[in-house]
Image: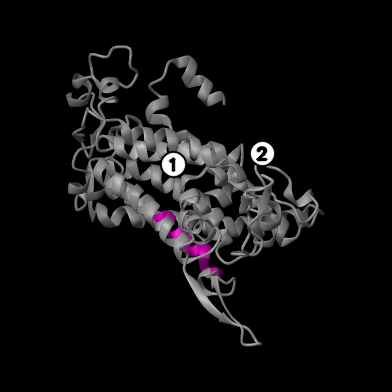
Amino acid sequence: MHRVRWVLTLGWLLLIASLYFDPVTKFFLDSSTTWSPFRLDPSSYLDPTKCPKIQGQCVVQDPRYMSAMIWWTIIVPAAILILISVGHEFWRRICPLSFISQIPRALGIQRKRKVVDVAGNVRWEVVTIGDNSWLGRNRLYVQFGLFLAGLSARLLFVNADRTVLGLFLLGTMLCAVLVGYLYAGKSWCNYFCPMAPVQLVYTGPRSLLGSEAHLKPKPAITQSMCRTVDPQTGQELGACVACKSHCIDIDAEDSYWAGLNDRGRDVVAYGYLGAVIAFYFYYWLYSGDWSYYFSGAWTREQGQMTHLFDPGFYFNGLAIPIPKLFAAPLTFVVFVAVFVGIGRLAEKGWCNFQSVQGRPVSSEQARHFMFTVFTAVSFWTFFTFGARPWVNRLHPVLFYGFNAL
């Protein structure tokens, strides 16, 4: 697994490097490469009757690179497919951010605090985040807030600007390393990672092909829990430092039910669907039609950050004078709030409906049912849009095959 993690991490670094030096993908975009489904025909992206538009104007595209398209429309959707099928435990074991957050531990340079016991003995131990600390109690709000900030950053700064995207990814990696230095265990994954709410939503009690840790005898080294290898016997050993109770990396089923009523849990479950819809719908709200999104022009748009103070909404030829810098975050706030409200009302409605039918359910059962419904709808919504800028260019057999999958 160490070798697999190193390969994936180096592959991620190679992709980041390709954002700055990419002599390969331009051939797939070149109009003379007739066999490529990604080629850009100058007549199609410069002709006002054919080109993808933003507020009635043709998008100025960079025809030399498709690294950003690979990242946003292939790698990110692939991560969602892994989470929903192979599972959280597999993803956590291959995630480059989870891996590099452990570098300080591997080097033995983690921050430690002085602890004096009742007998006056002094020891130094790695710092953990308490469940009752502010961060322990509000971690879901923190992570979901970072997730929404990341989506807003994509729409405003990161989607098409390769330099900013590279810095964004490198900065995220450095944050993971810093948290790994400051705190023990998988604190980055459990308390800070913006991807964690997505993992929480799609994993549920466990994934489609996930193992059943809750049925295994205790103690056991289960799922993606922290572990090490005995250098003499070569056997895996548990290395958990109890950085979080009911840890999803030890037992996803136990973690799900124990945290079903945690602060912010319903905000994540219901707000995630609102965030997905808001993210993709904003392309239409901003540009005025769907050509900007489905063409993939947003991954090649030149001067993305020069439009921050352009009108952020455009309806039927009418620009709404709210700067894009504020319009994009506002869209997330509105959609998340609406869907959280819908989800909470649906929970109560389901309880009442089942009672009327003579099949009363507990509030936990109603919440689990609605979490499941919202997760399914968010998955369908994501793949209605998520990979389309490249899937739509494929041969019809591959296109319909993707839909069938």
- Amino acid carrying mark 1 in the image: Thr
Towards the viewer: 239 or 67: 239
**Dot 2 or dot 1, earlier in sequence:** 1
Q: Secondary structure at mark 1?
A: helix
- Amino acid carrying mark 2 in the image: Leu
Q: Which mark is residue 208?
A: 2
| Residue 383: image location, x then y, percent | 49, 35
| Residue 307: image location, x then y, percent | 19, 47
> Residue at (35%, 45%) from the top-left corner?
282
> Residue at (60%, 45%) from the top-left corner?
88
Towards the viewer: 181 or 376: 181
Towards the viewer: 8 or 286: 8
Q: Secondary structure at mark 2?
A: loop
- Residue 318's place in the image compared with 194, above or below, is above
Q: Is residue 273 left or right of residue 321?
A: right
Q: Which residue is mark 1?
A: 9
**On-image quarter of the N terminus:** top right
Circles 2 and 1: CB atoms closer than 8 Å: no
Q: Which residues are magenta?
A: 136-148
